Amino acid sequence: MIMGVGAEKKLSKKASIGLEAELRTRNDLKTIDRWTLGIGGEYKPIKNVKLAAGYLLLNNNFREDISYKADGSYNNWRPSYWGIRHRVYASVTGSYKLTKNLQVSLRERWQYTYRPEKTVERWDFDNYWWEDKVRNGKGKNQLRSRLQLEYDKKHALLTPYASVELYNSWAIEKIRYTVGTDINLSKQHAFNVYYRFQDIQHADADDATPDMHYIGVGYKFKF
Amino acid sequence: MKKIFYLMVIASCMVACQNDDTDFSAYTNGTATIPTHVINISYNGNSVKVTGDNSGYVSVDGADVTVNATGKNDSLLLVLSGSTADGSLLVFRDKKYGIQLNGVSITNPDGPAINNQCGKALYLEVASSTKNTLVDGTAYDETKSYQQKGALFSEGQIFFSGAGELDVTGNCKNAIASDDYIVVDGWPIITAQSSTGHGIKVNDGIWINGGTLDIKVTADAARGIKCDSVVVITRGDITIKTTGDCVYDEAEGDYSSAACIKCDDAFTMTAGTLAMTSSGDGGKGLNCANIVNIKGGVFSAITTGSNEEGKPKAVKGDKGIILSGGSFYAKVKKSSACDNGVDTDVPSEWVTVVGTPFETSYDKKEIKVVF
């Protein structure tokens, strides 16, 4: 489950800034997977083109890690732990109206995520004791490419959409398939519900999750 | 709609309180059942009797015993007994295990008496009310592909325990050596002596939490305890004696002196007794490249050697000597009693006293501080 809440302030016809917060769960809602706080801004230099940039503070519940010996017996177990990550991003989105209400858009987003060094405990099955393990600081660049099709009818309550997003870091790491709809209650209040399937391809240890099905809900306040 | 959203958030936060880790609590709280594999090895002159070797770990050549338990995940205990004048124990393993010295005497003329090639913990129990002897030869067979650094050598940590007697004699290199760290628990009575190397040589620190240690080394530039890391004494009765002179170290371009304890990192003592005497030329009591911290216990360092080539010091702490408890006594026949890295001729400035001692006396060749 993914739950998000955000606020957006229009600075002009072309520019806006916003705050966002997000909570993710896993393990059938039983485990908090991550919470996020973010700040960002958008700018539309010309029609059909949008630029965006921002910063996200991510607090992850990194999943446990179990290593095995060649004979299949346990070697080490590092339990799940909470760790901060920092992310900056910049994106450019181009959109094109196929028909009056049907719009296709392509968003290219670069993001850099840094995980600071942290000392965690792990269980050594050889010695039957806890030992310290230093997870070194690590930075990572990713390019996210999202192709989205949406039906955006003026003054309509719903704006349904479907998208495919590729995470690329010298190889396709994961693919997100999303279908959902924005629910435009008023000019100020908008909700969002969606279903997402996340297909893991070549994720590294920090993103080593199994393929996931998400239900997402969100709320945005515009002023 | 808004209410539904808020309810979902609240509900999720309420239930999202379990982790999804694998339950290893049986391992971490010590209730997991791990069958102990006990192998009895009884030396008898030039032969050995082995019982309990259900997995075929043990091979024997005369009284030279090799235990090969690499890749095995069982809980292994080797129980040694008997006597041999030409035997040994060599162990290959990658998981912690135990050796119980149950009244054993091993002399190996061409290598270590016990050579532990396991990089993990070795739990070495000196069984209560037993006397055990480990002696190496004057020359090792250096064609071996593995390391041999003393009469009792371990690649991994050694955890001493028990309440029996253990005499270790090094005739070629060191008496006891570990390429990891050493912990002494319980109350074993350990004698380590060497005429060629150090009494105890250890890379990653030594923690003495009990027991009686009697260490004697006679070689030039030999150390009773040679440690590349910290030395921590929290209990126990320790006596260390060196008689060797200093020698000129070509590589260092300086004289290398004997010392009862030589440590490259901090020395800390909180309880117990430590009595050190060094009689060779330039010999030192405690030679610490870091800070000396004495918070309790009875500490004594006396050197009686000359200063013809080296500079005898009872206590040398390059980054300070801090006394905050217990009893401290340092005395030299030549040179100065203490050296804390500060360029001063005032004896009271060679140590840093924290608190109010019961008795103090500062002399160039004798310093005493008692709390």
Image (tube, coloured by chain):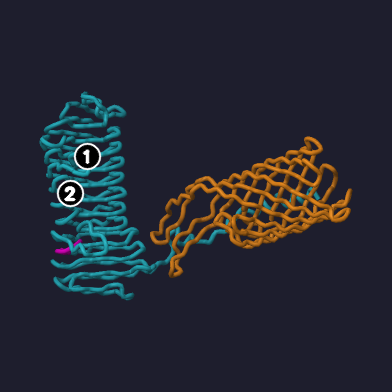
Chain colours: A orange, B cyan
SS state under label 2: strand
Q: Nearer the viewer, residue B95 or B294?
A: B95
SS state under label 1: strand
Question: Residue B295 location, x and y as percent?
Answer: 30, 36
Q: Is residue B169 visible?
A: no
Q: Over which residues does the magenta segment extend?
A: B106-112
Q: Chain of mark 1?
A: B
Amino acid under label 1?
A: Leu
Q: Residues at marks 2 and 1, common chain?
A: yes
Q: Are marks 2 and 1 in contact (CB under 8 Å)?
A: no
Q: Is residue B197 visible?
A: yes
How would you rate the neighbour count of disc 2 (Cα within 10 Å): few for under 14, some for 14-19, many for 20 or more?
many
Question: Residue B336 location, x and y as percent?
Answer: 17, 30
2 vs 1, front mark = 1
- Asked if residue B55 lies left or right of residue B88, the reply is right
Residue with the mark numbered 1: B286
Q: Residue at x 79, y 41 (%)?
A: A222
Give the quadrant of residue A198: bottom right
**Farthest top residue?**
B346
Residue B309, relative to residue B37: is it above or below?
above
Image quarter where the C terminus of chain B lies is top left
How would you rate the neighbour count of disc 1 (Cα within 10 Å): few for under 14, some for 14-19, many for 20 or more?
many
Q: Chain of mark 2?
A: B
Q: Nearer the viewer, residue A189 or B252?
A: B252
Amino acid under label 2?
A: Ile
Residue with the mark numbered 2: B215
- Asked if residue B90 lies left or right of residue A79, the reply is left
Q: Residue at x 22, y 38 (%)?
A: B299
Give the quadrant of residue B350: top left
- Asked if residue B2 lies left or right of residue A88, the reply is right
